[in-house]
Amino acid sequence: MPRDTPPDAPRDTQPAAFLGVEASLSGRRWVGPGLEVDRRAEALAQRTGLPRPLAQVLARRGVAPDEADAFLAPALRDLLPDPMSLRDMGPAAERFLAALKHRERIAVFGDYDVDGGASSALVICWLRAMGHDATLYIPDRIDEGYGPNVPAMEELARRHDLIICVDCGTLSHAPVAAAEGADVIILDHHLGGETLPACVAVVNPNRQDEDGTLAHLCAAGVVFLLLVEVNRRLRLDGVRGPDLMAMLDLVALATVADVAPLIGVNRALVRQGLKVMARRARPGLVALGDVARMEAAPTAHHLGFLLGPRVNAGGRIGKADLGARLLCCTDPAEAASIAERLDALNTERRELEGQVRAAALEQAQERGVDGPLAWAAGEGWHPGVVGIVAARLKEATGRPAVVIGFDGDDGKGSGRSVGSIDLGAAVQRLAAEGLIGKGGGHKMAAGLSLTRAQLAPAMERLGALLARQGAGQGGPADLSLDAAMMPGAATPELIERIEEAGPFGMGAQAPRFAFPDCAVHSARRVGATHLKVSFSDGMGPRLDAIAFGAFDGPLGPALEGHGGRRFHLAGRLEINHWGGRARPQLMLEDAAPA
């Protein structure tokens, strides 16, 4: 796929800054599409009749004119890989069907996050549709930690014939061995080690002996492929399996919430899953959307920022299985009750997160955030929020970040990565070198446990490993922009067309547009840190904008006290549904004096 400028190109070889913005209010250089992309966009617009801003977005993503229709309406049947391309898929499907045929006792052991809950729900709902019940087991984050543990697996093995581990298990050699008397299938996506647990099957696109073609799948995607293969085998025997398309809402939720890249089949899974979710057929997601006051049709943003955090809340600070139970729920009254509990837990989680975030950011800044790794550790920091705080620290510093909470001498931490930096592999290397108790994950996120004595040397070594990958080079990341636009052109109709190039998220950056030389007509603070703005170029209607967290940096004060100065404004367009009306709105991310 064509690129404008390699991300590691020296600054003096890069094209001129877009609109001449070398250093915006947030200190970023604005980078535009370049002449070649402009030429491709012009050709695409002429040959397809698509609006120029949409053509600009497609051209920047390397979409040719004859590929535009297929890109804007991706067909899952064309993009879905052959499940049998994954190692161990055959034995996994065969053993799964044998358990169904012989009415064996099945347990589903899932992780306590959204991906684990959705993966568990996929298996349980599929079996339920076939008239077979399964036991759900989600470990407690505090008491049991991540993944299978020996006592839980021993107990499940005493009462079940088959244990299916979803979103976990790839590194769980001892716990899997402890499941004597029961067979184990692992459906996972976390990085594998040199050896795999001894069990019936480990289906994982991130096994070391996989080619990486499907490495972008989350665990729910892997589970979905298993069910596709199982349904195929049932059809060969003349048996009709459950409707898998109706289960894509769960796959979409997990894919977005687990920050899997929205490329290839993931993009098609999420697009179709959003359509399924819009039908409001799953009681758990209906109840959760209602309690989250989700008034518009679901989008990837809703999955990542409204629904996902609430599903996660039970595993973070409450009862670990609440999220999975909600997603499996068939009774609307029970679903409403669980959703309300999760919403309350999410509010509590935000309060805990705020306390830890402030302390972690202060500590990291005192230590210095110009290196390859930003990290912080503190006594009593709740293990359920350190991952979210790590994400906030990553956003604030532009570096991979790790946040660790200690309870006495024992620490549990979580990390989040940026760009092409593989944090999971680096943390797994620490564990292999004996610098931490255990750790692993995937490219963008990782977990670890260690002692106080291990903290300093482990973080030093982790920083060195990440530096080898290029972490910490340069200042604030450039702001990549797709095109310039007049405020009056940003209509709801155009925004809906641009959304056809989505969904947007990890690996598929939402289009960002610049609005040159605009007058700020009003700018007022909303809440403690947010800013609402109304602006125009003087030749058309005004456009409203909102900038979240604007007063955490220079953006809010500069625009609030604009004094009549004109600005270039940049951000993402969305439709604001309010009072039964649809209005265009800019999610303002940056600005620069015109």
Image (tube, rainbow, N blue to C red):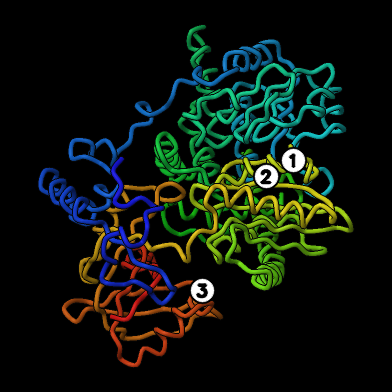
Label 3 sits on what residue type? Gly
Q: Which residue is mark 1?
A: 431
Residue 450 screen position, x and y as percent: 80, 49
Label 2 sits on what residue type? Val
* Helix, strand or loop under label 2: helix
Q: Nearer the viewer, mark 3 or mark 1?
A: 1
Label 1 sits on what residue type? Ala
Q: Nearer the viewer, residue 343 or 21?
A: 21
Q: Which residue is mark 2?
A: 427
Q: Is residue 442 left or right of residue 541?
A: right
* Helix, strand or loop under label 1: helix
Circles 2 and 1: CB atoms closer than 8 Å: yes
| Mark 3 to mark 1 CA distance (whole Å) | 37 Å
Q: Is residue 378 left or right of residue 271?
A: right
Residue at position x 70%, y 58% in the image: 403
Q: What is the number of the mark on residue 549?
A: 3
Dot 2 or dot 3, earlier in sequence: 2
Q: Nearer the viewer, mark 2 or mark 3?
A: 2
Residue 339 screen position, x and y as percent: 64, 53
Residue 74 screen position, x and y as percent: 33, 36
